[in-house]
Amino acid sequence: MKHRLEIHYCTQCRWLMRAAWMAQEFLTTFQDELTEVALCPGQGGVFQIKLDGHRIFDRASEGRFPEVKELKQLIRDRIAPKKSLGHSDRS
């Protein structure tokens, strides 16, 4: 089964480049598991990551931006638990 990942980012805050870089990281790491990574512009300081419609990270709730390593682990744990992330794996 292929999965859809959404990155909701704030255009007012100019977070497009951060969102696009993360999209590239996810598409490279999960090329066999993801069918799409959507960049979803928004406003009001939004920065959320959703996998198959379920929120897995929200900057407002967490009070910080996520680390790519952290997001890769969250995504992997849900869509490919046995997949090695190499240097991004937990110690």
Image (spheres, helix red, strand yellow):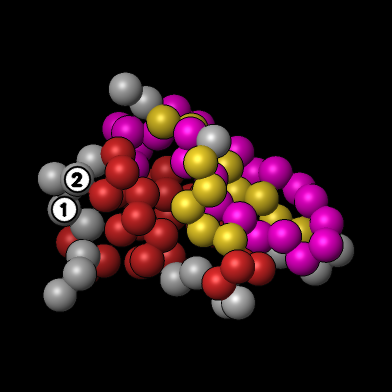
Q: Residue at x 22, y 57 (%)?
A: 85
Residue appearing at x 42%, y 43% in the figure: 27
Is residue 31 in the magenta section? yes
From the image, which quarter does the N terminus lie in? top left
Q: Is residue 91 left or right of residue 5?
A: left
Residue 84 tag number: 1
The span from disc 1 to disc 2 (Cα, nearest Å) is: 8 Å
Mark 2 residue element = loop
Tell me the kind of residue under disc 2. Pro
32 over 85 or under it: above or below: above
Q: Residues within 10 Å of mark 2 (few under 14, many from 20)?
A: few
User: In the current view of this chain or complex, which residue is farthest to the front?
Assistant: 61
Which residue occupies 31% across, 43% down? 78
Mark 1 is on which residue type? Answer: Ser
Residue 76 position in % (x across, y down):
29, 49
Where is residue 65 shown, x and y percent of the image? 56, 72
Residue 31 placement (x, y as % from top left):
34, 37
Q: Secondary structure at mark 1?
A: loop
**Nearest to the observer: residue 49 or residue 34:** 49
Direction from residue 54 to residue 40 in the image, left or right:
right
Quarter of the C terminus within the rendering: bottom left
Q: Is residue 17 magenta?
A: no
Label annotation for residue 81: 2
Which region of the structure is painted magenta? 30-52
Q: Majority secondary structure of the magenta segment?
A: strand
The answer to whether residue 67 shows anywhere in this view is: yes
What residue sits 19% from the left and 45% below the top? 81
Residue projecting furthest to the top:
1
Query: Is 75 in front, or is 37?
Result: 75
- Kindly indicate whether the residue at mark 2 contacts the one at mark 1 (C-beta within 8 angstroms): no
Q: Position of residue 75 (x, y in %)?
A: 36, 49
Res. 20 visible in picture:
no
